[in-house]
Image (spheres, rainbow, N blue to C red):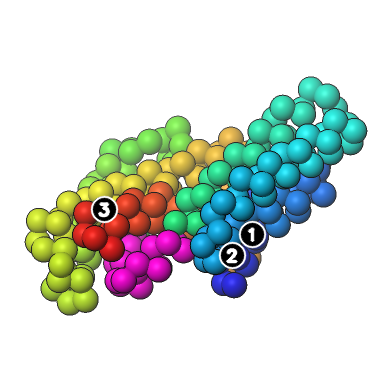
Amino acid sequence: MFLTLVLFIALLEYNRMGLGDSCRLEQWVCALAGALVAPLLFYAAPEQLLPLFTAVFLILSLFFLFRFKEIETVHHQLGWLLSGLIYLPFLLGHLMPLRMLEDGRRWIFLTLLIIMACDTFAYFFGRKLGRRKLYPAVSPNKSVEGGLAGLAGSVIAALAASFTFLPQLGMVGAVLIGLLLGTAGQLGDLFESLLKRACKVKDSGTIIPGHGGLLDRLDSLLFAFPLVYYIARFCYGG
């Protein structure tokens, strides 16, 4: 239920970020459809995803066919809505099968710990030591030094997890997973920054005072959770 609500709100933020007040009905339809991915995965009914997204595409096609205002913007609006249905439900949806693994809860805690450590180290060390811009065209405030510090924080967090609640990682595995998730988290952050700059907005929303929208809190995790699921399942046997 929590993940369904998170997906619904994040999709509304994503759609509003790119489309503003246009296509409001279509925005809500896509947010609702995307949120349904969570219960379908929870109840082990992934075969229902095909008819769900087929129905959504057909409904959107009819909406745009008979409701458009400016024909020149149809491809942009339809493309933005459909990209949101891949970006959020499919990436964040990996939380469901991850949680169902034998040590799924621990792997989720590991991911949260690594991403939070990465963000914290990158922020504080970047402010103190940052000199070289990491990717100014997308995120002017991020620095190379901050990015490297974030990776160091990720490795420290993964090692701490290996010594406490996930001993099966081992030291080598912890270092590799820390580097991988730290990199993925920063790439996820940069990708959402790219979308926000393209949409000319500072934050995806205002639901979290002082921190922006829900999507702003999820951006790093969206790229991390799929990797964690496949690592946990295929490298550590679930």
Disc 1: CA contacts within 10 A as few (<14), some (14-19) or many (>=20): some
How far apart are labels 2 and 1 at the CA level?
6 Å
Q: Position of residue 6 (x, y in %)?
A: 58, 64
Q: Is residue 72 visible?
A: yes
Disc 2: CA contacts within 10 A as few (<14), some (14-19) or many (>=20): some
Label 1 SS: loop
- The amino acid on which the numbered mark 3 sits, given as a three-letter code, is Phe
Magenta segment includes 101: yes
Q: Do the residues labelled 2 and 1 touch (CB within 8 Å)?
A: yes
Query: Residue pushed farthest bottom?
Result: 164
Residue at image point 43% right, 43% down: 190
Query: Residue pushed farthest left?
Result: 171
Among the two numbered marks 3 and 1 on one chain, the one whose residue lies closer to the N terminus = 1
- The amino acid on which the numbered mark 2 sits, given as a three-letter code, is Pro
Residue linked to disc 3: 234
Label 2 SS: helix
In magenta, the rendered stretch is 95-118
Residue linked to disc 1: 36
Judge whether 208 appears above or below 186 on screen.
Answer: below
Among the two numbered marks 3 and 2 on one chain, the one whose residue lies closer to the N terminus = 2
Q: Where is residue 219 in the image (x, y as percent from the top left)?
A: 47, 53
Q: Which of 182 and 140 is in front in this view?
A: 182
Q: Is residue 114 visible?
A: no
Residue at image point 56% right, 44% down: 86
Foreground label between 3 and 1: 3
Residue at image point 17% right, 51% down: 176
- The amino acid on which the numbered mark 1 sits, given as a three-letter code, is Leu
Q: Which quadrant holds the C terminus?
A: bottom left
